[in-house]
């Protein structure tokens, strides 16, 4: 189905949805340079859906450890638990009825209804976000559960966008699902690894099981980097089989995070826990140009 932004004259619900989608585009533009750039390589129909997904994910994340936490320290009556619960319930209602007074939720619900994102993907995401408010240290089991809900299901939501109206055999769909989950996991683990010190010092969290920031060393860094590389290798298998409307964008995002993981691999552990590693804008532009020209990650 076409995006509501594709018609020239709009009114009523179509106009409202256009405004909601515009708000989601503003969210991604302000919060994610790399991901924002990568979405520009998506086909028009896929682009607005992915932005709608990202915006809801970003708002939920800000509730558990971003803007809401800052407001909590300066204002009375800010309750992240209640706010997250309200956002979750409003999301379910909007997906069911097709409308929300919250523009970001409305845009997400529009996408969910269009491509078939169901509660079985939405609920694990909110469960993981809630974990950030309740749990500071993870064991292997809770870490895997958290990764699934916070990142893998987001990859699966995007996969619903990419494969919308594409007919697949069961084994083909299973391969795409494995690739989407692996890519989501890799993205999240890279973010955890680059934010080790900030998560521990500012938020009191330790995501990786058995990892202590004060004892973090190069051997542990290498083990985590290799685990991420394994996830990226899995995701590359299905990447080549994605529709042309999404292949270049997903490839660009993969190459962004692969470059970041490679930089982490050469950064001494003692430095990794002191500063946030990033890929330079010129390198991001080079990756983007490669993806635009059809170069795929090897």
Image (tube, rainbow, N blue to C red):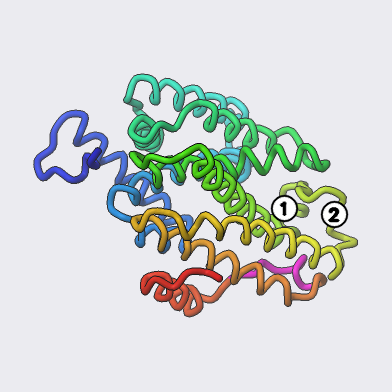
**Residue 72 image position (x, y, % from top left):** 61, 38
Select label 2 or label 1 by which is in front: 2
- Label 2's element? loop
Q: CA distance from mark 2 to mark 1?
A: 12 Å
Give the position of the C terminus as an image quadrant: bottom right
Q: Which residues are magenta?
A: 271-278
Occupied quadrant, residue 146? top right
Image position of 101 (left or right of 216): left
In the image, taking residue 26 as reference, residue 271 lies left or right, namely right
Across and down, in percent, residue 7 comes to 14, 43
Visible residue check, residue 89: yes
Q: Main secondary structure of the magenta part?
A: loop
* CB-based contact (under 8 Å), mark 2 and mark 1: no
> Label 1 crowding class (10 Å Cα cut-off): few <14, some 14-19, many 20+?
some
Q: Position of residue 273 (x, y in %)?
A: 77, 65
Q: Badge 2 is on which residue?
A: 211
**What kind of element bears circle 1?**
helix
Lower position in the chain sequence, tag 2 or tag 1: 1
Location of residue 71 (image quadrant)? top right
Would you place residue 192 above or below residue 135 in this image? Answer: below
Q: Position of residue 148 (x, y in %)?
A: 64, 40
Please check the rendered image and state whether residue 276 is part of the magenta-colored stretch, yes or no: yes
Numbered label attached to residue 199: 1
Q: Residue at coordinates 25% horizontally, 38% vertically from top-left? A: 1
The vertical placement of 50 against 63, above or below, is: below
Question: Residue sitting at 47 percent across and 63 percent down?
Answer: 251
Q: Is residue 76 visible?
A: no
Q: Which residue occupies 40% across, 75% down? A: 289
């Amino acid at each position: 189905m076409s995006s509501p932004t594709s018609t020239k004259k709009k009114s009523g619900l179509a106009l409202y949805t256009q405004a909601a989608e515009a708000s989601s585009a503003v969210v991604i533009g302000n919060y994610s340079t790399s991901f924002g750039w990568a979405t520009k390589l998506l086909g028009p129909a896929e682009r607005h859906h992915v932005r709608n997904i990202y915006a809801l994910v970003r708002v939920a994340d800000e509730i558990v450890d971003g803007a809401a936490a800052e407001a909590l320290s300066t204002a009375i009556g800010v309750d992240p638990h209640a706010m997250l619960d309200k956002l979750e319930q409003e999301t379910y209602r909007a997906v069911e009825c097709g409308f929300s007074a919250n523009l970001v939720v409305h845009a997400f619900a529009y996408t969910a209804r269009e491509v078939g994102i169901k509660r079985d993907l939405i609920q694990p995401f909110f469960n993981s976000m809630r974990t950030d408010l309740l749990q500071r240290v993870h064991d292997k089991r809770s870490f895997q559960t958290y990764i699934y809900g916070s990142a893998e299901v987001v990859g699966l939501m995007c996969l619903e966008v990419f494969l919308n109206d594409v007919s697949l055999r069961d084994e083909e769909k299973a391969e795409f699902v494995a690739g989407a989950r692996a890519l989501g996991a890799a993205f999240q683990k890279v973010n955890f690894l680059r934010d080790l010190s900030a998560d521990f010092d500012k938020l009191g969290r330790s995501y990786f099981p058995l990892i202590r920031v004060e004892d973090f060393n190069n051997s542990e860094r290498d083990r985590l980097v290799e685990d991420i590389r394994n996830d990226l290798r899995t995701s590359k298998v299905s990447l080549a089989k994605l529709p042309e409307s999404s292949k270049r964008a997903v490839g660009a995002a993969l190459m962004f995070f692969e470059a970041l993981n490679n930089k982490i691999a050469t950064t001494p552990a003692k430095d990794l826990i002191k500063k946030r590693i990033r890929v330079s804008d010129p390198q991001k532009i080079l990756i983007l140009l490669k993806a635009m020209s059809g170069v795929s990650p090897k």
